[in-house]
Amino acid sequence: MALQWLSLVGVIWLQSINGTNSNFPAYSSELKRMLSITQPQLNNLAAASDAGKLFGWISGTAAAHLPLWIVLLIGAILGLIGYGIQYLFLINQISSLSYWHVFLLTVLAGNSICWINTVSYLVSIKNFPLDRQIATGLSTSYIGFSAKIYTDIVDAVASNSPSERAKLFLLLNSVVPFGVCILAAPLARDVHVGKSRKLAGGFIFMFVITVFTGIYAVITSLGQNILRFLHPSTIVIGVAVFLILPLVVPLSEKVRETLQYKCLIRVHDEGASATSTENGENLEEGESNLSKFCEESVEEIGVKLMLRRVEFWLYFFAYLFGATVGLVYLNNLGQIAESRGCSGTLALVSLSSAFSFFGRLIPSFHDYFFKKSKYMISRPAAMTCMIIPMCGAMFLLVNKQDIWLYISTAIIGICTGAITTISVSTTTQLFGTKNFGVNHNILVSNIPIGSFLFGDLAALLYNGEKLSGEDNCIGQNCYQTTFIVWGFLCFLGAFLGFILHFRTRKVVIT
């Protein structure tokens, strides 16, 4: 079991550095200036990273035929190439690189995220067969921590020059995932634990660490506004400590196993031990049979049949008008802050990252503590409940005060993160687990579609508000119409989710 927990720690480390596309807003404005591109072109670059998800099925196919550590390293190499060449271009080591070269490199870098995610999901599912939903949700929450990690490192190392910060972000995006993937590669395998047992204590400790990690992320994201006495390097050290803390679980388990192995006093308890073991096996078998019954009660639906189901299209468009709209907002956060004259772009990115971290954690927390209670709700209902606050957050952004920008960013971050995690189990509950890889990849194809549509809409409205002769739009009106449109789209997404809940409420009882 020590190796079982160690594999989860490795997945947590992988996920914590795998959100390289989430820090794009922190350097997007500088990238726009250095490449001399227009706002629509910048929006297309933001969407290009999401476009890598269109080819995510390749990583799933590779994982079915190759060792997981090879799949992991392939993803790391793709990211190294995608971000690394862009970094070399910005430091003038590559003389000529067109906009479309940068676009394709961004797609390649975005696809690398799919490879690392595929390995992370498979390791969690295989090594925690009876607790795969909790293990997957817990580790996935750390993706929301990525932008916070990269931003803190840049704050501690780089100068105040926007150009130097942009270069360092691209360098970190290429090098850090590659290094962590090499470190975690030995753990990317099935440890053959059989049936998970006695994991309650470990999961509770993991939850405690994760919650305090999120609290630390939120507090330090406020930066100069509250914690002026903390040096940026001190914050980075704190982040490193919180990422190391999960090692306590596998280390304590290893100590327990060692002491148990060395214990030579086995007197007359063999009969009682055998009885206890038999009872434990019976209980475990009952849990396994219950899990098997629940899985068999869900209809296994293939791709062709799924695409003919009304439920799928309700689900697809609810996600498109919910989480995807939120992701587009977060991708445009840098330009939004700049247009409003807000100087706290990095703080906003860190804040959205921290609240996305909590948002991704909430479904796992709810599943663990309320799974068998009357307070458990269906997945479509949970997704709808997360879309509704986003409607209000979009309309709050019309207000000129910066405080509403911070509040709305936090709300959108937490809701988008929660929907992303909820969608994994929603897909399995609606369409089964057998074809999950293909089915879910088709669902998330709405993300690049929405990124292009909603991002280009924002860029067109942004350009429409520019004054003649100005390169950039400055003022409250730049995104005002966009926020109103996005707010109504979120309302539509919540309405579709509400319909999906009533159409499937007999199917998705947890």
Image (cartoon, helix red, strand yellow):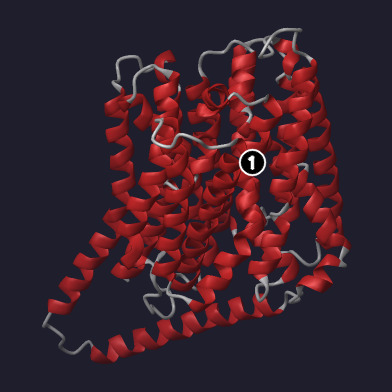
**Residue with the mark numbered 1:** 416
Q: Is residue 320 left or right of residue 251?
A: right
Asked if residue 372 shows in the view, the reply is no
* Image quadrant containing the C terminus: bottom right
- The relative height of residue 59 versus residue 155 in the rendered view (above or below) is below
Residue 170 occupies quadrant: top left
Give x and y (percent) for residue 222: 45, 21
Give x and y (percent) for residue 305: 83, 73
Asked if residue 474 shows in the view, the reply is yes
- The relative height of residue 427 versus residue 206 in the rendered view (above or below) is below
- For the residue labelled by badge 1, is the local secondary structure a helix, a strand or a loop? helix
Residue at the location (63% across, 59% down)? 55
Front position in the image: 245 or 308: 308
* Image quadrant containing the N terminus: bottom left
- The relative height of residue 94 versus residue 33 in the rendered view (above or below) is below
Front position in the image: 51 or 485: 51
Most extreme residue toward the front, as rendered? 95
Residue at the location (76% across, 46% down)? 320
Residue at the location (27% across, 92% down)? 271
Residue 408 occupies quadrant: top right
Within-10-Å neighbours for mark 1: few <14, some 14–19, many 20+: many
Front position in the image: 96 or 396: 96
Front position in the image: 498 or 454: 454
Residue at the location (45% across, 20% down)? 162
Q: Is residue 468 left or right of residue 195?
A: right
**Identity of the amino acid at label 1?**
Thr
